[in-house]
Amino acid sequence: MKGLNRVREALAHPLAAASTVAGVFGIALHPGVLKAFVLALWQSAPTLFTISSIGAFTLPKMLPKLELLKPVFMAALAVSGVLYLARLGKRTYQNFDNEL
């Protein structure tokens, strides 16, 4: 019985759900389409980060009806923030490598 509870906890973990959703999208979409989508997210990460931070922190204060969309903006902020930091890190590394 204890093992069954562990399995249920593992399946209900948010990381398991996220990897399942990513797998479904990976299967459903052609790899070329998926690559283009990821590249588009990579290129627009700074803009998406700015828009999602405004949507998560400023708009709900000004327009209380948008409070329902705050979790969506927070999720977009998390994804775009990681991409934006990765872009900054890559650019910094390239600049450092060019200067050597």
Image (cartoon, rainbow, N blue to C red):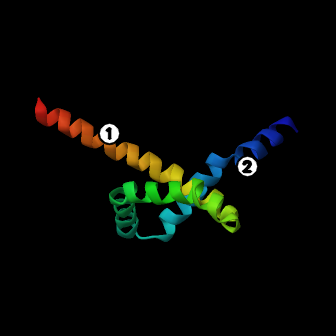
User: Of label 2 and label 1, which has the lower sequence position?
Assistant: 2
Q: Counting other residues with Cα less than 10 Å from the Cα at mark 2, is it few (<14), some (14-19), or many (20 or more)?
A: few
| Front residue (pair 9, 93) | 93
Find the distance from the CA under tag 2 to the CA under tag 1: 33 Å
Above or below 24: residue 84: above
Q: Quadrant of the N terminus?
A: top right
Q: Quadrant of the C terminus?
A: top left
Find residue 17 and report its horizontal and vertical position in percent: 64, 53
Find residue 28 and report its horizontal and vertical position in percent: 50, 70
Residue drawn at 53 percent across, 49 percent down? 78
Q: Quadrant location of residue 62? A: bottom right
Q: Quadrant location of residue 38? A: bottom left
Find residue 32 and report its horizontal and vertical position in percent: 35, 68
Q: Amino acid at mark 1?
A: Gly
Residue drawn at 76 percent across, 43 percent down? 9
**Residues under numbered marks 2 and 1 in contact, where contact means CB atoms less than 8 Å apart:** no
Residue drawn at 35 percent across, 63 percent down? 40
Q: Residue farthest to the top?
A: 100
Q: Amino acid at mark 2?
A: Ala
Residue drawn at 78 percent across, 46 percent down? 8
Residue carrying label 1: 89
Between disc 2 and disc 1, the foreground one is 1
| Secondary structure of the residue carrying numbered label 1 | helix
| Front residue (pair 42, 30) | 42
Find residue 20 and report its horizontal and vertical position in percent: 60, 56
| Secondary structure of the residue carrying numbered label 2 | loop
Above or below 49: residue 29: below
Question: Mark on residue 12?
Answer: 2
Q: Does residue 1 appear left or right of residue 16 in this picture? A: right
